Image (cartoon, grey):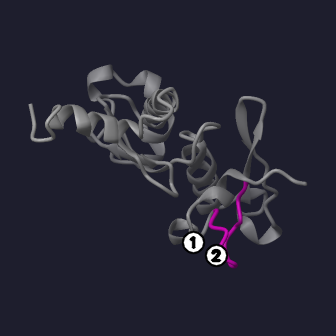
Amino acid sequence: MTEKAVQDYYPDDIAVCYGCGKLNEHGHQIKSYWEGEETVCRFQPKPYHTAFPGYVYGGLIASLIDCHGTGTAARSRVTSIAGKTGTAQVVALADDTLSRPDLEDVPTQLRDHAWFAAYAPTDDPRIVVAVLVEHGGHGGGVAAPVARQVIEAFMAAEKSRPGRGTLPEYLASLRAGPTGYGP
């Protein structure tokens, strides 16, 4: 049996992405797989993916980065996570986006903010997380792994409470107090 790709776990309502959507028959069908502790994507461009002879067009490169890089940053072996990455620009650094400097060359206070919003598990959501890393750069590489760690800690805490209901139910019972009418 072949291991399922990360993208194969996406809920059907978001599995239509042109780059990696399993339900988009005309898309690139980009797939990422676990190899040890990393996710790896292998994709062989077709001759029609070239912009100029010998150069792959930028849209394909963007799809690979988005569908593999940011799409797997929050991937967990503990639970299924659905989320959306984002980057909030702090200042315009260059008129020409092709000459944008590398992140490490940008003073910290001028770096973009990274964010990631997620919920888990995808089939029965019990936690919602929003992470904002000020001046963190890009959401997929910085904020998504933080969200994954928070979600995994939540799931571990919930699992350590057998027979006592879910963690949200327990917290609600604490707010209600012993009489059920609040503290």
Identify the element where label 2 is drawn: loop
Q: Earlier in the sequence, mark 1 or mark 2?
A: 1
Q: Position of residue 14 (x, y in %)?
A: 51, 66
Q: Main secondary structure of the magenta part?
A: loop
In magenta segment, residue 26: yes
| Image height of 70 relative to 122, above or below | above
Quadrant of res 88: top left
Q: Could you tell me if the residues under marks 1 and 2 are in contact, i.e. CB atoms within 8 Å?
A: yes
In the image, 160 versus 134, the foreground residue is 160
Q: Residue 98 at what x, y percent from top left?
A: 48, 47
**Range covered by the magenta-colored residues:** 20-31
Q: x and y percent of residue 49 in the render?
A: 73, 67
> Residue at 24% of width from left, 39% of height from top?
172
Does the segment drawn in magenta span residue 134? no
> What amino acid type should be assigned to the residue bearing mark 2?
Asn
Of the pair 92 and 130, the residue shown nearer to us: 130
Residue 16's label in the rendered image is: 1
Q: Quadrant of the N terminus?
A: bottom right
* Residue that appears at 43% across and 38% down: 138
Checking the image for residue 24, the label placed there is: 2
